[in-house]
Every structure is written in structure tokens, then in C-alpha cells.
Amino acid sequence: MSDPVTRNRSRATADMVARTANVSRVAVSRAFNPHASIKPEKRDLILKVAQELNYTPDMAARSMVTGRSHLVGIIVPDISGPWESQELDAMTTALQAEGFATLLFRTRDDLSLDETLLTYMKGFNPDSVIAYAENVRPTTLARVLDRAVPIYIGYPDEEAAEEEAAPLFDRLDVLQREGIEQAVALMQGYGARRFAFLAGKSNSLATQSRERMVRKVIAERGLPPPIRIQGDYMYDTAYRETVNQFRLGEPVDAIFAANDVGAFGAIDALRTELGLRVPQDVKVVGFDDIHQSHWKSYNLTTVKLDLAERTQALLRLILRRLKNPTSPSLTETVSTRLVVRGTVG
Amino acid sequence: MSDPVTRNRSRATADMVARTANVSRVAVSRAFNPHASIKPEKRDLILKVAQELNYTPDMAARSMVTGRSHLVGIIVPDISGPWESQELDAMTTALQAEGFATLLFRTRDDLSLDETLLTYMKGFNPDSVIAYAENVRPTTLARVLDRAVPIYIGYPDEEAAEEEAAPLFDRLDVLQREGIEQAVALMQGYGARRFAFLAGKSNSLATQSRERMVRKVIAERGLPPPIRIQGDYMYDTAYRETVNQFRLGEPVDAIFAANDVGAFGAIDALRTELGLRVPQDVKVVGFDDIHQSHWKSYNLTTVKLDLAERTQALLRLILRRLKNPTSPSLTETVSTRLVVRGTVG
DNA sequence: TCTCAGAATGAACACGCTTTCATTCATCGT
DNA sequence: ACGATGAATGAAAGCGTGTTCATTCTGAGA
């Protein structure tokens, strides 16, 4: 009877609970709905019987009639990346606290997968969708899913034509200027003059925005424009391209990386392969402030994207939109700031 | 009309597609079921109309009648950890390729959450459940969920009473002896004699098993029993406790860490805080072989748990069990092997 | 031309639940 | 003691699908 392989495979239903407790099936439903009107003693009895029968309301059946699936779809390009996984962790925890389960999907870099994936996901009727994958455009999201209102993560610092960032979407605006200004100022203060920007994946809006802002701030301070090193957010690429830059190209004073992992690759390239010292010979700053950035081997000075702040802002957007599906578009704003450690001076 | 906020919020149903295409609703259902008997031209027409109407079958409704939710529940203690996120990434990708969506849950270290979480998850009717969280016992899993057969991740190397590892569960057996033997042999070969074992969370079966096996192998080779350093799989703890061991306790020749992240903490403690060289003064070996282990700052020699192999084995278990729910318990086996890098000699 | 097997078709039912809605019960003020 | 008010109750309808099952259609063989 306790053998999980051969035991009763059928779930208990509300009917069974009703029969066992000698109440109507409607009463069982009410017992599990906090706002329903039912006598307390009756509810207690039903809940007790339900527990004995190992009964749980079927979310699929429930969602069909309520229209709420209690599912939030999350689309991530690479779950195993430190930043992505830390963001996913924070978001899942926050959602769970609000009673939502996370429906997780992973995109490949292959853009062609998008439509198929979104269509498939739509079948599960998620109450909301968060697409961290930058190859999923908000317009596509809006077209395929008809229930959820997409959240557009924008970078309003810049004047770049905000192509698809109409007021049709809810927005999370990330203010990157402050953190970048602090970083450039700090590096310049320690004598850096010749900068390189270690870019991320070239189709990433985040890296594009960061590069523009870095160039702007550097120009404002009367420094020569930074050299671009093309990376893809990955350690190995950052390592290799940094070596190439110093061996085949022009050496620099300072490297501003589009993300922390890239900064790690650059640091290791400088120290291991090029025999240079960080920060004495070359200053390095990253972006994100992932857990690993405070590890002593790197001890990275970096522009922090506050994960808790960001997660709570996203959550507010989702909850407000769910509460009032027809309200005009919402906006939340988060900022950035420099975390000073040991890779500048 | 393209405004996602005010546009039609109601999904298209099979009925609407049927009306538009002038076919019966049953035909629509068949058009989306590959094995159904329907005239090809008719199917094409329906699929075309469906696409125009942006129709997708509702998985909730579908799962009610088929009994298959196409959902696999995954429970993880800390998504942001490198090993956990890499395992989650591999598993989600593999599941997605088989047509399953991942239903993600995160446990706190607080054990009391377990039942509640499992009960909640059960409501979504997952076709299968993978609990990477070691505080979720298979027996609890079997009791709460009535459809899924739990998979027990065991370590049959050891003689330890395998408390709840009855043949009632499907099993993934991890053979740890080989990798550990290679590691100890290598360290001994480079002159190590006095070992420490840097443990993980004390309630983790994996760390317990690894410690027993490490002790056994060390004893077999005629070396003195290792000193235990109590960690919790985290960098900061490993760093602090390693410093304490060398400052307040007895220094050692070699550190065998229960996971890679712990090994990083130990290495940084040795180099940064204690002024010792790795591997010249102290040899270090880790466990897992996460992506970060090949980063040049660590370049860690470690016992590899092959993620692809492990994921495929788990997937085979799940698919076979789904195909034949009443078959006797299944077992898959994966092994470990040493990856030699630069922290031993 | 006729027969018959197999493919194609659609009406009806079932899945497990929530929500109206009309009805009954308990409670209270006078 | 008596309506009146609100809480508690259960029958029935409906959510969007897949699956019988009985029927009709198709085409090949005689």
C-alpha cells in the first residue's frame, strides 16, 4: 500500500472528499477558497478529510474556470550563467511567495526557435511572462500571447530610437548613467586614460546601451574614445579577445566590461597570459555584481544592478497588471551604482 | 488593435477555429493530434486557419482528459549556485527537447516548507518530479505525490544503511569511488600525506557519501585519516573555515573539497590570507567540475560528475516510467572521473 | 455493378473544478 | 413571537479539450 510503484495512481477528487465527509462537492470547493462563505466547523472537517485522502485541488481544472493559471512563464537564454541564474533564483523565490509557480523555458541562440517556443508556452496559459532573453522582442511577445502584457526592459538614458518601446508595454527602466559615471571617474582618478570596452553579445540591447553610455561619459570627461573589444558575455571569449587586443592591437589602461564574467576573463588574460598586474598596470571594471565578483581571486570593482530591487520592481509590475488588466501602461525604475573593490586602485 | 493592453484578451478556442474553417470541432482536435485520422488537406486548412486566429490548444483542458500535463516539476534548493544552475540548465534543455515544460520550485533551507511546497506542486499534476533538494526525502515525495514515481539518487559505493532506498523507487546510482581513487592517488603521488576533507552541508547525502569514500580510500592507501573541515558548499564558509583550520588548528598537505565552490574558497584562503602556494604548499581537489573550474585563477583539479551523462540517465528514467507506469523499479548508473588541472602538481 | 474493409466524420460524453442563482437556515431587533 | 436581514447551502451550468462509438464515405477487388 505504500509502494509508490503499485499504489493507487488516481488522484483524489473533490467528489471523493465530499462523499467521505458527507457534504456536497460545492462545499469542498468552498473549503479551499478563503473568501467563500462556509461554516468554519464544516470547513475544518473538509480540510481534515481532504488531508487524510491526500487531496489537492487540481490547478488545471481550477484555471479553466477561474482564468488564472497561477503560472508565470520565464524565458532565459542560458540558465547556467551566473547572472541569469541569480536573477532566476530571485524571481522564482519572489513569485513563489506570491503563490505563483515558475514555468521555465530556455531559448537557444538560434532566433528561429522563438515563435515555436512562445506558441508552445502560450498553451499553458501563463498569467504573465518575463522574457530575459534579449532575442525575444516585446512585439513578438505581444503578438503571440494574447493574455499577458509584456514588460519591456528599457534603458532610457540614451537617445537611441526606442524602436519598439511604445507605451503599449509595461516598462522597467534601468538607469545606467550613475554607475557608469562613478566607474569612469574612479578609473580616471587612478590615472587611466586609454579605455577599452569589452562588449557582450552584439545583438544584446543591454550591451549596446552600456557601450553608448560608456562612450558618452568618457567623451564628456575629455578622454579619447574607447577601443571596442568584441565579446559575447562569456569567459573564454573575453580571455581570448583580451589577449588578442594586447598582442595584435593596441594595449589600454583600463577595461570596462559589459558584464562581470567577461571582466573575469579579461583579468585572467592580463595576469596569466600577458604578465600584467591588475590594477597597477590595467584597471578593470565589470557590470552586474554577481556573487562571484567578491571572490578574492577577482575582487572585482563593478557596476551593481541591484537584484532585489529589480526583482521587486518586476513583481510590482506583474501584480498590478494582473489586478487591473486594462489599466494604462505602467513603469518602474531601477538605478545602478558602483561597488568599489580591488581592480581599479 | 495591436495594442496589447486593450486588445482582445480572450484566447481563440477550437470552436472558433471550427466555425471559421467550416469544419467540426472534433476535426480541429484531430488536426493537432499527429496520430489522428484526418484527411491531409483538411488538416492543412485547419492549421492555416488556426494560425490566422492565433490559436493554440489549451494545455490545461487537454491535460484534464489525457492525464498528461507535459509538466515536469523540478525542486532546487538554490538556483543561483553554479552546480545547481548548470544541472537545471541541462535538465530543462533536455526536457524541452522531449516536449516537457519545466515547473520550477525553490526550497528554503527551512525543512518545514517541504510538505507545503510538494502539496502545492501536486496541484499542477506534473508528469514527473525531480527533487535535487536533499532535504526532500524520497519517502515524503512518494507519500505526497500519487502519480509520479520518485527517483532516488544514491551512492551504492558505501555500506551505509541505505535507509529509505528501497526498490520502491527508481534509482540513479552515482559511482564515486573511481574519481576519488584517482584524486587521492594523484595527490599522494605529489607528496601529500596529511589530508583535510572540506565538507558540504552536513545533512547532504552527497557530502556524507563523499566523505566516507574519501576516508576509505585514504585508509586503504595507508595514510592517516583526514581532518574534517565543516563547510556548507558555500565560498565564504570555506574561506573562513580554511583560515581557521590553519590558524587555530593543524595545517594540512592537501584539501579534498566536497564541491568546487568550496575548493575555490579554500584556494583563495590559502593564497590570499595564509600566504601559501597552491599546489606547491597545499594541494587542492574539488568535486563537480563546474564551468568556473577551468577559469585560470583557479584551474582546479576536480572529480567530474558528467552533467550530460547524468541528465540523459535521469531523462531515460523519466521517459521509461512514463511509458510504463507499472513496470518494476528502474536503475541507471553514472560514474565519476578525475579532471586533472593545476591545483595538485 | 456490387461488396466490403478501412478511412474519415461528428454527436455525445467525460475530465475536475468554480460560479451563479435560487433556496433554506440562523440570527437579531422590535 | 415575528418578519427581516444576511449567511450558508446545493443543483446546474460551463470552462476547452480528447476520446469513444456509431455512422458515412471512399476506393479496390470480384
Image (cartoon, coloured by chain):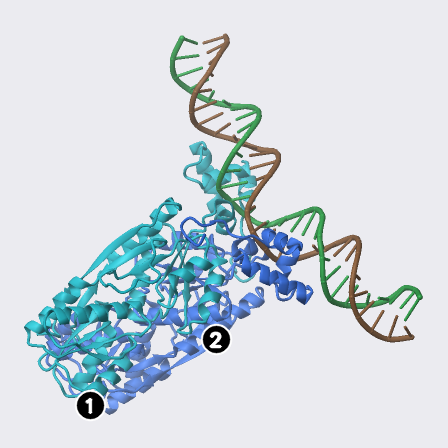
Chain colours: A blue, B cyan, C brown, D green
Tag 1 subunit: B
Answer whether residue A235 is visible to the viewer in this image: no
Picture quadrant of residue C17: bottom right
Query: Which residue does the image show at 53% across and 69% down from the upper left?
Result: A319
Picture quadrant of residue A215: bottom left
Position of residue A85 measured from the top left corner of the image (x, y, whole percent): 34, 69
**Horizontal arrangement in the rendering, residue A291 relative to residue B127 (left or right):** left
Position of residue A84 measured from the top left corner of the image (x, y, whole percent): 34, 69
**Horizontal arrangement in the rendering, residue B246 relative to residue B207 (left or right):** left
Vertical position of residue A207 compared to residue B3: above or below: below
Whole-number angstrom distance, CA of label 1 to CA of label 2: 49 Å
Quarter of the image that includes the N terminus of chain B: bottom right
Compare residues A168 and B24 and report the one nearer the observer.
B24
Q: What amino acid type should be assigned to the residue bearing mark 1?
A: Arg
Answer whether residue A201 is visible to the viewer in this image: yes
**Horizontal arrangement in the rendering, residue B315 relative to residue D12 (left or right):** left
Query: Which residue does the image show at 57% across and 59% down from the upper left?
Result: A50
Query: Which residue does the image show at 46% across and 75% down from the upper left?
Result: A312
Q: What amino acid type should be assigned to the residue bearing mark 2?
A: Glu
Secondary structure found at label 1: helix
Total labels: the figure holds 2
Q: Tag 2: Cα neighbours inside 10 Å, few (<14), some, or many (≥20)?
A: some
Vertical position of residue B259 compared to residue B91: above or below: below
Vertical position of residue B159 compared to residue A144: above or below: below
Quarter of the image that includes the C terminus of chain B: bottom left
Give the number of the disc on residue A332: 2
Position of residue D23 measured from the top left corner of the image (x, y, whole percent): 57, 24
Residue linked to disc 1:
B247
Determine contact: label 1, label 2, CB under 8 Å: no
Tag 2 subunit: A
Position of residue A254 measured from the top left corner of the image (x, y, whole percent): 21, 82
Q: Tag 1: Cα neighbours inside 10 Å, few (<14), some, or many (≥20)?
A: few
